[in-house]
Amino acid sequence: MDSFEDLKALVARFRELGATRIFFKPLSENDNSKQQVYLGGSFEVLTYFPYGEVQAEPGLKDPTFKAPLDFFWIGPTSREKAPGAQLILYSRYPEVRLSGFLRGCRTAPNEHLRPTPKDLRRGVDGRLLFFGTTADGLTLAHLAPGGSSLALEAALAPHIDAGLFKELAVPGTPAGNSKSLVLMRLREIQQLGPVPSMRLNRNGERIPYKALNGGGYTLEALLGITPNGDAAPDYLGWEIKAYSGSYITLMTPEPNGGYYGANGVGAFVRRYGRHVAGKDQMYFTGRHHYGKPDATTAMTLGLTGFDNAKGVITDASGSIVLLDQGGNEAATWTYSNLLTHWNRKHASAAYVPYKLQSGADPSYCYRNPVLLGERTDFSKYLSALVAGHVVFDPGSKIDGIATARPKVKARSQFRIPRQRLSVLYEKFEELDLSA
């Protein structure tokens, strides 16, 4: 593979190909084509890479997940895809490794990724593996050999230390500065005072929103975020959540197994929900804590394939389960599905309190403190569920049960008390933006 003349040329080439984030990892001799490239000791690593659908590999000795990468080796004039590149998540340890990055790629740096005999290994050997990630889901890569001018220059260049990775500034993008930009915009929104309730339509136009649940929609509209079910972060790489009560909604994933997964929300509510007195409605509600039958539904939330004491997944096919009184799986959420959503969406998150100004036309004031969570891991989420902090707090319903065309609404939400939010993140701050 051709090398770059200097770091400026590498950054310019990555930027030309759409990279909005550039970071590198110093390699050790055991980072090679045989033993794979070690990326980190927790699933937090997943917040750096745009990966495809996570697949469980339950038949292996150790519980393992795999996630494909749209991965390209980059040179000054070359760009070639490594079709077999993937992330491998070993959940028992836990750790994440990069695999399949050489196979089927003519310009890959094979000569610099050959295994080193055990008796000759001395740890970090001077090689640097650069990554650039793009908004459309590509991972770009370039390897600088140990002792090369590029490796020596990059090792001394200004960077943000992010654990195993060293992040470089990317000209023309908010990378490394997105936090300050998010806080600046939230401060501006706070200073607006009461804001009429609104949302964005599919064309990105602001339109009035009359219902009294518009606090989140209005904040998204002010930030230019069109409502969608995408698992990507909302704004400059940050998930933005507005809240007004003591509980905060973390995510609303639909079950993909159990009775619910097989038959859908309508059948589930008819079987497990309750009728509303005097109305043609059924609801499924309740605040379900781990290991305790709920007072409303008598159903119990649990986990399969998770070691509570060690905080690690022990079965790649495991799931969050909701059991009915007979011990049947009424609903399940597989770890492979939830893991993708959690790590992509919650890597960096801002929780913004608001107050409803009621009237003929509702409006919202956005307040302090803003809560910031950075660096998370799916095992933190599962541990918080076991501790009783994260709860399943659904609000699914059917209107017009006796009619020919009943209206069904799915709302399978997981929530956490505001005062427990910090347990989900490595770094957590409460900021008064008026100060």
Image: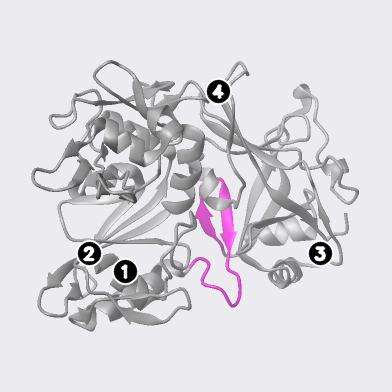
Mark before the other along the chain sequence, 4 or 1? 4
Residue count near mark 2 (Cα–Cα under 10 Å), binned few <14, some 14–19, many ≥20: few
Question: Which residue has dot 4 on it?
Answer: 63
Q: Secondary structure at mark 1?
A: helix
Find residue 4 and name its label.
3
Task: Tell me if label 3 and label 1 are in contact, CB under 8 Å.
Answer: no
Find residue 315 and name its label.
none
Apparent side of residue 362 relative to residue 321 in the rendered image (left or right): left
Callout 1 amino acid: Tyr
The N terminus is located in which quarter?
A: bottom right
Mark before the other along the chain sequence, 4 or 3? 3
Q: Is residue 61 above or below residue 23?
A: above
The residue positioned farthest toward the front in the image shown: 404
Look at the image and say whether residue 30 sits in the magenta stretch: no
Callout 4 amino acid: Pro
The CA span between labels 2 and 1 is 8 Å
Residue count near mark 3 (Cα–Cα under 10 Å), binned few <14, some 14–19, many ≥20: many
Residue at the (61%, 15%) spot, across then down: 61
Task: Tell me if label 3 and label 2 are in contact, CB under 8 Å.
Answer: no
Task: Tell me if label 2 and label 1 are in contact, CB under 8 Å.
Answer: yes
Residue span colored magenta? 159-176
Q: Is residue 249 above or below residue 208?
A: above
Residue count near mark 1 (Cα–Cα under 10 Å), binned few <14, some 14–19, many ≥20: many
Look at the image and say whether residue 161 sits in the magenta stretch: yes
